[in-house]
Image (tube, coloured by chain):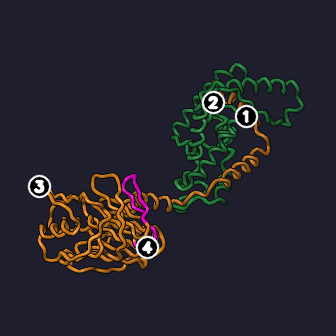
Chain colours: A orange, B green
Amino acid sequence: MKASGQDEFEKKMNARMKLWRPPFAEDAEERAKRAVLSRINHRPESPSAEVIRLRRRLSTPLAAAILLFLTGLPFFVWFAGQERIENASETVLSRSLPGGSAVTMAPGANLSFNAWLWPVSRQLRLSGEAFFEVMPGRPFKVVTDGAEVAVKGTSFSVWAAPSRTFVHCLSGKVEVRRGNTSAALMPGTAVRADAGVAALFAVEFAHKGPFLPAPSDLNFDEVPLCVVVSVLEQVFDTHIVSEVAPELLYSGDLTGKSRDECLDILARTFSLSLRFSDESIILMP
Amino acid sequence: MGLFGKSESKKEVLSHREFEQVFDAYYTYVRNYIYYKCGNAELSEDIAQDAFVKLWEHRNKIDKTSLKSYLYTIAGNLLINKKKRELLKFKFLNLQTDRSEQKNPEYLMEMREFDQKLQDALAKIPEGAREVFLMNRIDDLKYREISERLGIGMKAVEKRMSRALAVLRDELDKNL
């Protein structure tokens, strides 16, 4: 009886349920399809599985390679493009720079610049003395231990030592900067920058061309006395303090003379007195 | 076996045309399945549509032979995420009329009362059992098909079915 009752129950229930439908409109499926297709058609096409796998495989090494490239590129450009010119001879050395500019280097001078970056940054570092003839164009900058010399197109000389830098303008306009101090040089003017001193000292003289001879050939032609003194400091590895007017120009040949002979000649020429101490020699009026 | 049987390459990505075929074949069932769970027609439609959009978005990762179970699973998860699983009264608004019953108004009245009681009883069936019961009785799905779509075993389907019938009997036996 129980089984019969269950059958009857299920039979009646099934009969009723076959007449039931979920409460959705007749066109609900069609509207839903249109809505879904519209949604997926407005979404960007997903990449294929192969592309996704390939991206996953490549993403890490690719990212590493890109990072390495981006971080290494500046170093590579900096080191690979670096050029250095050194005048180890006893005579003047003339060289062309990229872009048509030229440099004449005194003995012992050396300079370096980046040839790859030269088209966008005409900057070089100088030690020693050099005479530059600069083609017009981007700013041309000479950096020494003591100063920065910036020009656009001109000719000028720079003598750079750790303790002192001279810049002499021969044509055009030269700007010399030392920290926050700057000086604009006109043709025939020079400026001196001393280590440890913020100020720039102006020197006027009309000398043309590189003003320093080779150390073995100390032949000066209208060279400021302060420059001559600096050369003697370098040649004889001594410290000379000059307390004389910077506008004094010296012409003469000191080749083959000893340090004391050179100083004696300078003192007699300009009626100066010399005082010797353990650490330095003082040249004063 | 579904629309795209195992003879097809598993690595092939579902095309737009195939997606439409899948939609035509399964949308109604997925929507009803959610409706059987929550009793909310509007929510069921929204969730079923979202499930198909997700299917399209993840078509690169889905094995074509498991589209059905994927759709049911994703729809079920979407419902869980909606947190709208309140037990609602089921209203099968499109109740069809059996022409053979039209002649007897008393019988019709009795049946309307029975329908109401049946709907109340359905609401009392545990969710898992109710969806299996309605998938079988409304959507005419076999136990094996329900098992495949829900990703559960045949035994589980039978057990849920028995539970649903037991609740219905308890609630309706006295009315038969």
Residue occupied by mark 4: A171
Residue occupied by mark 3: A277
Q: Is residue A54 among what the camera can see? A: yes
- Which is nearer the eye, B157 or B54? B54
Looking at the picture, how far across and down is residue B122, in whole percent? 67, 27
Residue occupied by mark 1: A17
Tell me which segment is drawn in magenta: A170-185
- Which is nearer the eye, A98 or A31? A98
Q: Few, some or many C-alpha atoms within 10 Å of disc 4 (few <14, some 14-19, many ≥20)?
A: some
Q: Amino acid at mark 1?
A: Met
Looking at the picture, how far across and down is residue A29, in whole percent? 74, 46
Q: Is residue B48 left or right of residue A257?
A: right
Q: Which mark is residue B84?
A: 2
Residue A173 is a magenta residue: yes
Position of the C terminus of chain B by quadrant: top right
Looking at the picture, how far across and down is residue A153, in whole percent? 46, 72
Q: Residue at x 26, y 71 (%)?
A: A250
Tag 1 or tag 4, which sits nearer the N-term? 1
Tag 1 or tag 3, which sits nearer the N-term? 1
Q: How far apart are the two marked residues, 2 and 4, measured between alpha carbons?
A: 87 Å
Q: Amino acid at mark 3?
A: Ser
Q: Residue at x 73, y 34 (%)?
A: A17
Q: How far apart are the two marked residues, 1 and 2, measured between alpha carbons?
A: 26 Å
Per the image, label 1 sits on a secondary structure element best described as helix
